[in-house]
Image (spheres, rainbow, N blue to C red):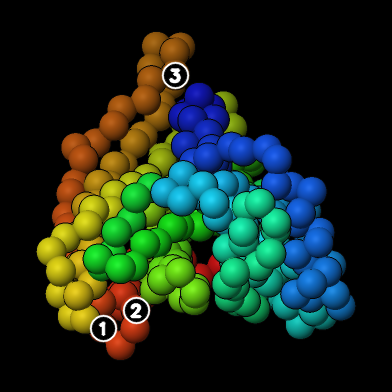
């Protein structure tokens, strides 16, 4: 069980992309957009966009106000900048978008997979993760948000789809149970306004660990699968509440 929980932490929190070279611009962007707010540089991330190296992407985290602090939330600024000059091309601010939990560590990563949602609409993703794998009640979750960019404007079109989720309970030695959900996203056929539908494939596994003849033995149940189809409507992909991460 302990090994399984370590694997959970790795799978939930490993960034999609590591990049150095733009970090020195993050404070400049923060000062430009929100001079009155405090940048959480440890949680913020940036990277050159492989689909368009002339552009750089960033997800900046800002400490929340007093009310948000009570709710364990921080604010998120997602931006596209000119790689050569650092000039901001487009940005979108989302107050309270970064939910946190007591006893859990947070992580943000950019997802630059080739999300071609429409012929003239490239998109990229921001993955936000929480890992609470220590202790007798481990939990973790990763969500994916997508942002469409048309060369001038940046617009959120998918809001915090839960793509990985895990929880369990054990005695910190062996005995316990563990549930995990993993979802994969694929691009479907064009639909409303030329935007492709999104197909979500889900796999759920229930695991149990017990001491058997002095050894810790883990057994995985039969994986259960199902699928969903997300349709673009009224400017975004609507999500059922059970697929969306809230904090």
User: Do labels 2 and 1 touch, CB within 8 Å?
Assistant: yes
| Residue 212 drawn at (x, y percent) | 38, 17
Seen at 47% across and 37% down, the residue is 11
| Disc 2 from disc 1: Cα separation | 6 Å
Whether residue 9 is visible to the viewer of this picture, yes or no, is no
Closer to the eye: label 1 or 3? 1
User: Do labels 3 and 2 touch, CB within 8 Å?
Assistant: no
| Disc 3 from disc 2: Cα separation | 47 Å
Residue located farthest toward the front when viewing the structure as drawn:
84
| Residue 169 drawn at (x, y percent) | 50, 44
| Disc 1 from disc 3: Cα separation | 50 Å
Q: Which residue is mark 1?
A: 233
Whether residue 210 is visible to the viewer of this picture, yes or no, is yes
Secondary structure category for the residue under label 3: strand
| Mark 3 or mark 2: whose residue is earlier in sequence | 3
Q: Which residue is mark 2?
A: 236
Relative placement, left or right, of 99 versus 165 is right
Q: Quadrant of residue 98?
A: bottom right
Seen at 76% across and 54% down, the residue is 25
Closer to the eye: label 3 or 2? 2
Q: Quadrant of residue 91?
A: bottom right
Q: Which residue is mark 3?
A: 216
């Amino acid at each position: 069980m302990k090994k399984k929980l370590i694997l959970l932490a790795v799978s939930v929190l490993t960034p999609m992309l590591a990049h150095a070279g733009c970090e020195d611009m993050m404070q400049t962007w923060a000062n430009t957009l929100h001079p009155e707010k405090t940048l959480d540089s440890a949680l913020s991330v940036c990277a050159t966009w492989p689909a368009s190296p002339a552009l750089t992407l960033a997800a900046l985290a800002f400490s929340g106000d007093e009310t948000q602090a009570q709710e364990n939330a921080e604010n998120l600024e997602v931006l596209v900048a000119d790689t050569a000059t650092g000039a901001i091309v487009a940005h979108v601010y989302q107050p309270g978008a970064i939910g946190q939990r007591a006893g859990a560590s947070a992580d943000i990563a950019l997802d630059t997979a080739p999300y071609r949602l429409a012929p003239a609409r490239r998109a990229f993703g921001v993955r936000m993760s929480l890992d609470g794998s220590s202790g007798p009640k481990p939990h973790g979750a990763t969500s994916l948000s997508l942002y469409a960019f048309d060369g001038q404007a940046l617009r959120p079109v998918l809001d915090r789809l839960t793509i990985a989720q895990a929880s369990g309970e054990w005695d910190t030695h062996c005995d316990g149970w563990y549930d995990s959900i993993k979802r994969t996203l694929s691009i479907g056929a064009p639909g409303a306004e030329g935007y492709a539908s999104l197909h979500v494939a889900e796999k759920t596994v229930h695991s149990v660990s017990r001491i058997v003849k002095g050894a810790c033995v883990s057994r995985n149940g039969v994986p259960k699968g199902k699928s969903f189809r997300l349709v673009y409507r009224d400017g975004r992909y609507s999500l059922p509440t059970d697929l969306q991460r809230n904090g």
